[in-house]
Amino acid sequence: MRRTTRLQDVPDLPGIRLHTAVDVTLLWHATGVELGLDDAPLPYWAFPWPGGLAVARHLVAHPELVAGRRVVDLGTGSGLCAIVAARCGAVAVTAVDVDPIARAAADLNASANGVDIAVTRRDVVAEPPADVDVVLAGDVSYEESMASAIHRWLALASAAGVTVLVGDPGRTYLPPGLARLATYEVHSTREIEDATRKRASVFTLR
């Protein structure tokens, strides 16, 4: 990770830095070697994604959403949303990801930003909703089966009184019926998107 990424400022989020891919092809190959896979998954943890950027921007604009509260960042990737939640005053932040390199990236990025977060591989979607106050879910609607399972779990969490914030630029499997809270224009990269600027919204469950 240190060899194939560069610690860079995140646009529109002053003071936040992430280890970001410089050459995605090189990083993809290194990921496959590290995991012992010929066909490694896209190193999604090496970029800030539009949905996560929207959630992060929304937390900066509304820190009261997480200040003094217990937060879970679902599918944390780079750890961006978890890091911003911690910077905004959350009392406990847990970053969840099943990808071992994403968990390492979240740890590394948290250290680079001077915050403490707990990082776990637990498949929380297979468990009852977590006993927390807020769940963040940035860009979790790009694959059908995953999106379906996650949004069912988010609905259960919301019904249990948890505040759910979903960030998404309009992915195919974003379910209908969500309440839009805000829309942000965020920076992106053609390594993972079709444009260098995207509009992404933050939603909650009704």
Image (cartoon, rainbow, N blue to C red):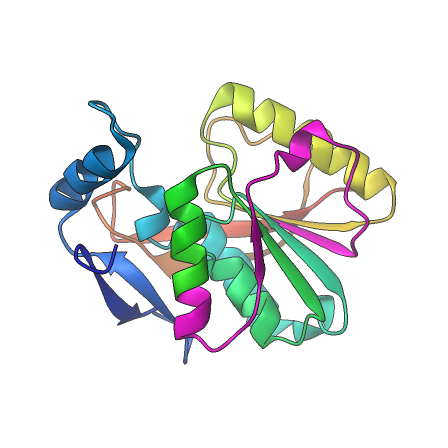
| Figure quadrant of the C terminus | top right
Residue 175 on the magenta segment: no
**Range covered by the magenta-colored residues:** 109-136
Percent x, y of residue 60: 56, 73
From this viewpoint, is residue 29 visible?
yes
Relative placement, left or right, of 111 versus 96 is left
Q: Which residue is found at the position 12% from the left and 44% from the top?
A: 26
Relative placement, left or right, of 168 versus 86 is left
Relative vertical location of residue 148 with respect to residue 109 in this rendering, above or below: above
Residue 193 in which image quadrant:
top left
Check the image and name the residue furthest to the top: 145
Of 96 and 175, the residue lying toward us: 96
From this viewpoint, is residue 184 visible?
no
Percent x, y of residue 48: 37, 55
Percent x, y of residue 14: 41, 79
Of 26 and 159, the residue lying toward us: 26
